[in-house]
Image (cartoon, grey):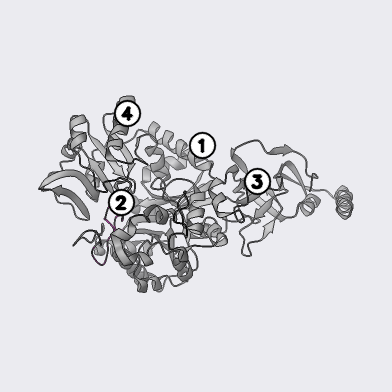
């Protein structure tokens, strides 16, 4: 009775004063605002692509006259999800090449390549996604079978992590790679003084140089395909970890033409010409594109034994991995970046690579303020090196929880007791005060709910292991959601414009089919996105939830 009287009072008051006309009222929801206090609201107003007010529906009806009303019918709404480390452009290109993910043997890899080429008849066969650690024989494949099947067609197929490649003889010949070829920062594998076709880290560049560049049409189709694959998961901003100037400009043109809705935080690849161009031009910032960081690589990946370790690999005597950048070269780059408004984001997997990056970061940033340099992955650290994350938010761990649950089956074989300081996400959070969370797709799957599950539960999709992998480093749900929203926004210098549902911020939000903050662990991976909004525009929907002009249908 009191509620009815209150609504009647609202109507009477509204009739006496003119309401402000706005675009949209979102009502009857459980809204995790992810503001400073992690408040929960029921309704908010959107106008001109931004959130105008947040509160209870009854209060908002008094002041605003919406053109449209979205009755969420009690469903959960969270801020638009931000993937703090992914490869959006590469995902699009990968969708146009041979998909080798999930293969259980090299024979299956070959079968997929044969089927792909039969359908596509390409002049240069590309593929990605194989992982020898998933096979019964956990060894790198060799090129012999590909040489026999495709003696005249070059083939380059990349491991799931992007840090190892198998090339057939035709591709090696095109790249002028011989058994005596030397390339620092990686390995050209030989067995019995014969090339196997395996290239690790920097030598792969010689193959990339002879691969035909995608046409503009292929690039556009790839970007649009990548957007289709990500919007359905509620991803509204994606940090693309390493883009060329030309790719960035293409993305900018598609966004300005209204063809690409997704917001991109673009890290410029560590190419001297591209870096110098953006440093000279300054920060590029539009409504959907933000360019103010440079992506560098310190080492390779653990799965291909390219991660740089302080002590030898536990499963390969006298092998330490390798830095893919010279220390002098990295210091020079860091010094150059420090004299600009740009951020430096560096891939570091092994404890040796993390030490080098953190030590150089620390020495350069001692007197710096609000630099927010990021360590991408921060995967294996020696205990004493965690102290470099001092909680001053000048050095930020950018981590991908699904790496832990993908690598847990074999990682201890690689690094032995060092595993206890690997994938240590809670420890990193405690030291740094915040973490930015991402997927690293297409290395991992696109779904941010896998990220959420891996961070909170530390299990794979089948529920293994029962007690969770190193469960002491699990994060709670609130911090995990912060890492996927407001902390990720902070790591992009965007915390004042996105990352939470607050007045003045972009109306980027996601409607879920269940309350991800309270459902049982085993239900997290069943979560579906019912609608995704960017700047107040519905860019993805499972069904039409929008209802016209029903601002008073409160319950």
**Few, some or many C-alpha atoms within 10 Å of disc 1 (few <14, some 14-19, many ≥20)?**
few
Label 3 vs label 2: CA separation? 38 Å
Q: Which residues are magenta?
A: 298-312
Q: Nearer the viewer, mark 3 or mark 4?
A: 4
Residue 197: image location, x then y, percent: 19, 43
Q: Nearer the viewer, mark 4 or mark 1?
A: 4
Q: Main secondary structure of the magenta part?
A: loop
Mark closer to the chain start, 2 or 4: 4
Is residue 44 among the parts visible in the rendering?
yes
Mark closer to the chain start, 3 or 4: 3
Label 1: which secondary element: loop
Label 3 vs label 1: CA separation? 18 Å
Label 2 vs label 4: CA separation? 36 Å
Mark closer to the chain start, 2 or 1: 1
Label 2: which secondary element: loop
The numbered dot on residue 405 is none
Residue 42: image location, x then y, percent: 71, 53
Mark closer to the chain start, 3 or 1: 3
Q: Image quadrant of residue 172?
A: top left
Which residue is denoted by mark 1 in the rendering? 257
**Few, some or many C-alpha atoms within 10 Å of disc 3 (few <14, some 14-19, many ≥20)?**
some
Asked whether the residues under the numbered discs 4 and 1 touch, taking CB atoms below 8 Å apart as contact, a structural biologist would say no
Which residue is denoted by mark 4 in the rendering? 115
């Amino acid at each position: 009775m009191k509620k009815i009287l209150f609504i009647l009072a609202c109507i009477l008051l509204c009739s006496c004063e003119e309401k402000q006309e706005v675009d949209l009222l979102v009502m009857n929801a459980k809204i995790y605002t992810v503001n400073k206090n992690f408040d929960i609201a029921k309704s908010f107003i959107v106008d001109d692509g931004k959130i105008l007010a947040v509160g209870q529906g009854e209060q908002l009806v008094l002041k605003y006259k919406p053109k449209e009303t979205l009755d969420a019918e009690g469903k959960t709404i969270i801020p638009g999800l931000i993937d703090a480390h992914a490869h959006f452009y590469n995902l699009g290109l990968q969708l146009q090449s041979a998909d080798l993910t999930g293969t259980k043997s090299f024979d299956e890899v070959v079968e997929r390549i044969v089927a792909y080429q039969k359908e596509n008849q390409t002049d240069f066969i590309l593929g990605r996604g194989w992982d020898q650690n998933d096979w019964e024989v956990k060894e790198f494949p060799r090129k012999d079978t590909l040489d026999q099947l495709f003696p005249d067609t070059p083939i380059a197929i990349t491991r799931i992590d992007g840090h190892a490649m198998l090339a057939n003889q035709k591709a090696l010949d095109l790249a002028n790679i011989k058994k005596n070829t030397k390339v620092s920062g990686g390995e050209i594998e030989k067995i019995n003084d014969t090339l196997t076709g395996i290239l690790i880290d920097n030598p792969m560049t010689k193959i990339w140089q002879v691969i035909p560049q995608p046409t503009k049409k292929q690039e556009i189709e790839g970007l649009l395909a990548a957007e289709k694959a990500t919007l359905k998961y509620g991803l509204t901003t994606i940090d693309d970890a390493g883009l060329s100037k030309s790719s960035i400009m293409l993305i900018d043109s598609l966004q300005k033409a209204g063809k690409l809705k997704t917001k991109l935080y673009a890290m410029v690849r560590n190419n001297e010409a591209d870096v110098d161009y953006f440093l000279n031009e300054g920060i590029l910032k539009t409504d959907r594109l933000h360019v103010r960081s440079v992506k560098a690589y310190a080492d390779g990946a653990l799965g291909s034994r390219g991660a740089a370790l302080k002590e030898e690999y536990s499963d390969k005597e006298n092998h330490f991995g390798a830095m893919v950048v010279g220390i002098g070269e990295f210091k020079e780059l860091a010094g150059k970046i420090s004299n600009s408004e740009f951020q430096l984001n560096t891939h570091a997997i092994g404890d040796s690579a993390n030490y080098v990056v953190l030590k150089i970061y620390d020495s350069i940033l001692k007197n710096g303020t609000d630099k927010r340099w990021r360590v991408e992955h921060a995967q294996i650290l020696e205990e004493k090196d965690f102290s470099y994350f001092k909680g001053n938010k000048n050095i930020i761990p950018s981590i991908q929880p699904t790496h832990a649950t993908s690598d847990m089956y074999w990682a201890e074989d690689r690094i032995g007791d060092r595993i206890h300081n690997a994938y240590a996400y809670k420890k990193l959070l405690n030291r740094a005060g915040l973490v930015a969370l991402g997927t690293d797709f297409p290395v991992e799957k696109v779904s941010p709910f896998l990220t959420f599950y891996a961070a909170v539960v530390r299990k794979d999709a089948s529920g293994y292991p029962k007690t969770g992998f190193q469960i002491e480093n699990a994060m709670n749900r609130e911090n995990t959601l912060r890492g996927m929203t407001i902390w990720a926004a902070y790591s992009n210098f965007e915390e004042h414009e996105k990352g939470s549902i607050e007045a003045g911020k972009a109306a980027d939000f996601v409607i879920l089919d269940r309350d991800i903050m309270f459902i049982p662990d085993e239900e997290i991976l069943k979560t579906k996105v019912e609608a995704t909004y960017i700047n107040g525009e519905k860019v993805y929907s499972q069904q039409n939830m929008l209802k016209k002009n029903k601002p008073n249908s409160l319950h």
